[in-house]
């Protein structure tokens, strides 16, 4: 077998699907079979195990926390880019403009990028808002960026990307990135300092209290089944500030988690008005 890939039986695939669903809420379709084989074969070989069955047995017996994390990291899909679905950033700018107009300098502004992958989403928010509102440097402005995949979180925290990440961006959007001697680009320190990257499983406990003036959870729930989607989106209702917004991915909807929200734009939600709470239009 050496450098080749291991054979994945139907039973082994079922066990792997069950495990990644249990630990991460990720529902792998049968179309992901090839991906599972190619991504997990490397790990199984490195552990010197004879088969996927032996690998799942090993994980079920406990493995180490690193082994469990490597399994999840291998099965996430991390596709992202700067200014993805950029109508959300236009909308956020309008929201932040009204917060700035209505609050004293130095006020708190908290945003959450949930399922941030390699960081392009939270850095886009930071770059875009700092550019539009330089006065935010004097605000208590922080972005929490979380993901279940510890490998992407570690890369995101560096803020270093290949030059190709800038293709498709306007000159104005590309300008703030620092060009490095090795040909890579780096997110400027002013934006990096605002973003705190932390590992967080959205189907586990959430240690932070909020509230957040806006939450981005885009193209993450697409990997969950309907029930998990509803549960996760429903939990965001407790974390969004009364006049804050929830932004989700272009192909997603809130499903059973949508009771507390009303749709105010393309995949943009705000909390429903309650008798005790006034919600901005
Ligand atoms: C396709 S990326 C989306 C990145 C970014 N939000 C965007 O829209 O460009 C999906 C991310 O969701 C993360 N993810 C999947 N299951 C998760 C879970 N249970 N908890 C937290 N993050 C999860 C993956 O690790 C991956 O980085």
Image (cartoon, rainbow, N blue to C red):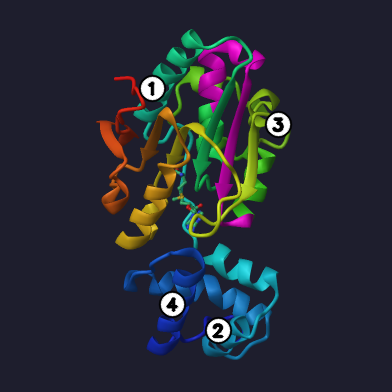
The quadrant the C terminus occupies is top left
Residue at 60% x, 17% y is 107
Give the residue at mark 3.
Answer: 180
Q: In the structure shown, which secondary structural element does the residue marked by tag 3 occupy? A: loop
Instruction: Judge whether residue 266 can be spotted in this image.
Output: no
Residue at 69% x, 29% y is 193
Q: Foreground: 162 or 31?
A: 31
Q: Is the residue 38 above or below the residue 77 in the image?
A: below
Q: Residue 119 has which mark?
A: none
Q: Residue 56 has which mark?
A: 2
Q: How many angstroms separate mark 4 from mark 3 (CA)?
A: 43 Å
Say whether residue 239 is magenta: no
Give the residue at mark 1.
Answer: 90
Query: How many residues crowd around disc 2 within 10 Å: few (fewer than 14), some, or many (20 or more)?
Result: some
Q: How many angstroms separate mark 2 from mark 4 (CA)?
A: 10 Å
Sequence-wise, which precedes: disc 2 or disc 4? 4
Q: In the structure shown, which secondary structural element does the residue marked by tag 4 occupy? A: helix
Give the residue at mark 4.
Answer: 18
Q: Quadrant of residue 156?
A: top right
Tag 4 near tag 3, CB within 8 Å: no
Q: How many angstroms separate mark 2 from mark 3 (CA)?
A: 42 Å
């Amino acid at each position: 077998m050496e450098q080749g890939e291991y054979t994945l039986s139907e039973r082994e695939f079922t066990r792997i699907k069950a495990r990644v669903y249990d630990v991460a809420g990720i529902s792998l379709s049968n179309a992901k079979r090839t991906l599972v084989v190619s991504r997990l074969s490397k790990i199984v070989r490195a552990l010197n195990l004879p088969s996927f069955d032996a690998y799942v047995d090993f994980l079920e017996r406990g493995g180490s926390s690193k082994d469990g994390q490597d399994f999840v990291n291998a099965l996430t899909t991390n596709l992202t880019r700067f200014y993805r679905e950029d109508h959300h950033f236009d909308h956020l700018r309008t929201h932040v403009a009204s917060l700035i107009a209505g609050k004293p300098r130095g006020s708190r502004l908290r945003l959450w990028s949930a399922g941030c992958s390699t960081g392009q989403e939270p850095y886009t928010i930071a770059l875009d808002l700092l550019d539009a509102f330089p006065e935010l440097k004097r605000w208590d402005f922080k972005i929490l960026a979380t993901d279940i995949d510890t490998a992407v979180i570690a890369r995101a925290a560096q803020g270093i990307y290949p030059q190709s990440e800038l293709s498709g961006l306007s000159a104005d959007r590309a300008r703030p990135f620092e060009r490095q001697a090795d040909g890579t680009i780096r997110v400027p320190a002013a934006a990096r300092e605002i973003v705190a990257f932390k590992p967080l499983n959205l189907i586990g406990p959430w240690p932070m209290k909020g509230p957040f003036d806006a939450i981005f959870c885009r193209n993450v729930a697409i990997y969950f089944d309907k029930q998990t989607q509803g549960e996760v989106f429903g939990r965001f209702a407790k974390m969004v500030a009364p006049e804050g917004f929830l932004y989700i991915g272009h192909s997603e909807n809130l499903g059973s988690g949508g009771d507390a929200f009303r749709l105010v734009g393309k995949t943009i939600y705000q909390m429903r008005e309650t008798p005790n709470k006034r919600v901005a239009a």
